[in-house]
Image (cartoon, grey):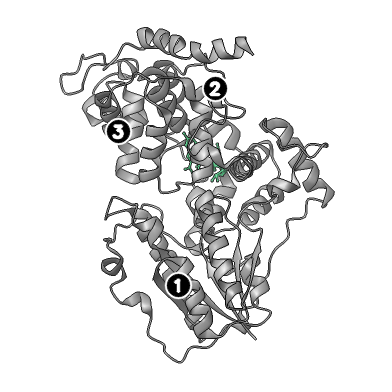
Amino acid sequence: MAHLCWLRRDLRLHDHAALAHSLAEETTLVFVFDRHILDRLADADDRRITFIYQSLVEVETELRKRGSSLVVLYGRPEDEIPKLAARLRVSKVFWNRDYEPYAKDRDAKVERKLRSQNIEAQDFKDSVFFEAAEVTKNDSGIYKVFTPYKNKWLEKLSEQDHRIPEHKCDLRNLRKFSNTESILEADWYEAIGFRPNPPLLSGGTKAGRKRLKSFVDRLEDYESARNFPARPGTSSLSVYLRFGNLSVRDLLRTGLQNPSPGAKVWVSEIIWRDFYQMILDTHPYVEKGSFKPEYDKIKYPGTSAHFKAWCQGMTGFPIVDAAMRCLNQTGMMHNRLRMITASFLTKILLVDWRRGEQYFAQKLLDFDLAANNGGWQWSSSSGCDAQPYFRIFNPYSQSEKFDPSGEFIRLWVPELQDLNNKQIHHPDGKNGKYPPPIVSYQINRMRCLQMYSVVKKSADAN
Ligand SMILES: Cc1cc2nc3c(=O)[nH]c(=O)nc-3n(C[C@H](O)[C@H](O)[C@H](O)COP(=O)(O)OP(=O)(O)OC[C@H]3O[C@@H](n4cnc5c(N)ncnc54)[C@H](O)[C@@H]3O)c2cc1C
């Protein structure tokens, strides 16, 4: 009896539900560079490919120390996994569940093919702490508002005495490979049509653990520091969760073992992650449309020229431009800035939130369909538990409040470096090198309220 464990968004060898179970028998590990996903990536320098590559090299190095190796394939998983399973004559294939519509469809196809070959497939909860069916209302209904969801989530945690289980992986049962040549030493990037482009945060569990360890000292101050993009107030661990170099349980354990008001707020943010995964799992239509369907009636009059200026960080609104330039150059953006730029695109430039969502999906190192979609629908008011449509972030006051000395703006919009701490939030064309605002905030704020009136009318009619 031999097993195959298929790694996907869980690139680690510890606290891994599928791997822990698979290792009950001799196990081979495989990763597939999925053409369905890669073929849609427009940028040959996409940093996420390098992040994945770095993570795989780390996994493979650990496996080779134990006389084993990692099988790395390129193709369509529904072809590659059943083919490999047959070649290795395994009796079972293990993987961790993924709640994205594409992934659910892919996994169902792989499972069907395996069954037709008399090979079993088994999947596990791993990437979230609680799945949709575990945190429901008393009448089994699905929560659409975060706070009661969070309360129930915490209640479930206390029912298990706040214990965070660990899926221990006993690596002694790995399949031995006589061939010690690493498949990743060959020119993988070229073979799959990409070029190496190392991100600021390196991929791998070691790098993730180091970041988590350094964050523990700042955890206590999280609540007060987390809104200021110029400060290292947040953990920057989202990418390690996205690709599973760390488990969600690694983070929760850290949060619970270091109790403080800051840790409590941080754990809440991790619960938001479960919340959006639950929403995507139970309402897959949100991938394409508004959670609240009446919001799909809105006609966004924003122009392509304004969208382009937003993408390039050339809107004449310094905090927005600084955030977008930072995203373009690093693949990273602070949460406060994601809220400001998303609100600005939809409610001031009046551009459809889906265009912004797509742009973030191309650029963010930590891009995650559930969290990104949830964040955009929250910002554009079309989502569950979203901010009301008439709440419109003022980019000037947000800038004054959360980047008071303009430190973040100066870093990314060097044209404004010489302005004083007051002017830097409102350069208004005073600096010839920087564009004047492409729209009037006040006028477009009023246009936005008008634009959303179709929603109000349909709500009034109901
Ligand atoms: C428009 C918009 C788009 C977003 N797109 C993404 C995305 O593609 N991927 C992504 O991981 N997050 C996304 N977020 C959520 C949030 O901005 C990031 O998770 C956060 O900035 C990551 O930084 P951190 O690791 O330092 O977070 P911390 O503040 O240290 O939080 C710890 C962890 O909690 C989770 N988390 C925090 N806030 C949220 C949130 N609002 N929703 C869901 N999970 C959260 C993340 O996994 C994060 O790593 C988006 C938010 C908005 C408003």
Residue at mark 1: C-beta within 8 A of ligand 1: no
Q: Position of residue 207 (x, y in %)?
A: 47, 60
Residue in view at x 51 percent, y 64 percent: 11
Spatial CA span between label 2 and label 3 = 27 Å
Residue in view at x 75 percent, y 48 percent: 134
SS for tag 3? helix
Q: Report which residue position mark 2 lands on.
A: 294
The residue nearer to you, when weighing 206 against 218, is 206
Residue 417 in view in this figure: no
Q: Position of residue 297 (x, y in %)?
A: 48, 21
Name the residue type under label 3: Cys
As displayed, is residue 377 above or below residue 299? below
Give the crowd class for mark 2: few <14, some 14-19, many >=20 residues within 10 Å.
Answer: some
Residue in view at x 60 percent, y 30 percent: 384
Q: Report which residue position mark 1 lands on.
A: 80
The residue nearer to you, when weighing 283 against 441, is 283
- Single out the residue that lies furthest toward the left: 432
Say which quadrant the N terminus sits in. bottom right
SS for tag 1? helix
As displayed, is residue 459 above or below residue 56? above
Q: Nearer the viewer, mark 3 or mark 1?
A: 1
Q: Report which residue position mark 3 lands on.
A: 311
